[in-house]
């Protein structure tokens, strides 16, 4: 069975601070995808990134960066110089292609960025 | 990326009634899914909507309670039947891109059952 753990339930930072959201996953499959989604207070789920299990390169997109380490089964997400607009719930998710492409979500991390 | 719309965006319903939620994708997707997000919780997969055949339900979800249709590649409906307050949730549909693993979500339907 697949599992995604986001141990941080809630994080509060002051604007311009850097913040890292942790994600640890479990699967026995060798082919899988990892995702991060953002859910602002309005409720929609915004796709941020997809990473396949064979690509361990870290990725940077503006203020966002992701660190994928298969050795520790982690896919952490860092926001640099956080802004109030980053306040949202962030979900990490795992998809097994063999299992019908279904997403298994973590419990989410509520990020609050204050002035 | 696919753009997914849902109707209604929100509704308040009485116990014992049913509500049908529509999901429309602006381009073809290979697979469509329905998720439920109870207040303050994560997303849980209800079922995979299969085109032209019965949906595939996850453990804990049954067709009588959540009938799903997918008559074509870009449209699906989810009905929440005989509602109770415990069904108050956000219901989201998603589509899997044919180009590879991206899964996009609709804006959700916020359902309150009184």
Image: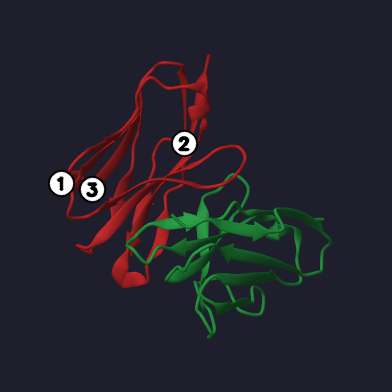
**Residue holding disc 3:** A73
- Distance CA(mark 3)–CA(mark 2): 19 Å
Reply above or below: A41 against B1.
Answer: above
Looking at the rendered structure, the secondary structure element under dot 1 is helix
Q: Position of residue B38 (x, y in %)?
A: 61, 52
Q: Which of the image's four quarters has the N terminus of chain B?
A: bottom left
Looking at the rendered structure, the secondary structure element under dot 3 is loop
- Distance CA(mark 1)–CA(mark 3): 6 Å
**Residue holding disc 2:** A9
Q: Chain A colour?
A: red
Crowdedness near tag 1: few (<14), some (14–19) or many (≥20) residues, C-alpha within 10 Å: few
Q: Mark 3 near mark 2, Cβ–Cβ under 8 Å?
A: no
Q: Mark 1 near mark 3, Cβ–Cβ under 8 Å?
A: yes
Q: Chain under label 3? A: A
Looking at the rendered structure, the secondary structure element under dot 2 is loop
Q: Is residue A69 left or right of residue B58?
A: left
The furthest residue to the bottom: B53
Q: Chain under label 1? A: A
Query: Which chain is displayed in green in the rendered image?
Result: B
- Considering only order in the chain, which callout, 1 or 2, is on the residue closer to the N terminus? 2
- Considering only order in the chain, which callout, 2 or 3, is on the residue closer to the N terminus? 2
x 50%, y 78%: residue:
B50
Q: Position of residue B65 (x, y in %)?
A: 67, 74
**Residue holding disc 1:** A71
Crowdedness near tag 3: few (<14), some (14–19) or many (≥20) residues, C-alpha within 10 Å: some
Crowdedness near tag 2: few (<14), some (14–19) or many (≥20) residues, C-alpha within 10 Å: few
């Amino acid at each position: 069975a697949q599992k995604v753990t986001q141990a941080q339930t809630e994080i509060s930072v002051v604007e311009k601070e850097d913040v890292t959201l942790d994600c640890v996953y479990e699967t026995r499959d060798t082919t899988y995808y990892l995702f991060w989604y953002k859910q602002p207070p309005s409720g929609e789920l915004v796709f941020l990134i997809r990473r396949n299990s064979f690509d361990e390169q870290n990725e940077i997109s503006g203020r966002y960066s992701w660190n994928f380490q298969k050795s520790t089964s982690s896919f952490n997400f860092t926001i640099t110089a956080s802004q109030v607009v980053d306040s949202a719930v962030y979900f990490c998710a795992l998809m097994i292609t063999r299992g019908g492409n279904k997403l298994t979500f973590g419990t989410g991390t509520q990020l609050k960025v204050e002035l | 990326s696919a753009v997914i719309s849902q109707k209604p965006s929100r509704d308040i319903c009485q116990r014992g009634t049913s509500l049908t939620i529509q999901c429309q994708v602006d381009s073809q997707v290979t697979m469509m899914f329905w998720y439920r997000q109870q207040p303050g919780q994560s997303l849980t997969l209800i079922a995979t909507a299969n085109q032209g055949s019965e949906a595939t339900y996850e453990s804990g979800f049954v067709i009588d309670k959540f009938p799903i249709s997918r008559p074509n590649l870009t449209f699906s409906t989810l009905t929440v039947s005989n509602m109770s307050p415990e069904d108050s949730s956000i219901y989201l549909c998603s589509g899997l891109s044919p180009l590879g693993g991206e899964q996009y979500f609709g804006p959700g339907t916020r359902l309150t059952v009184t």
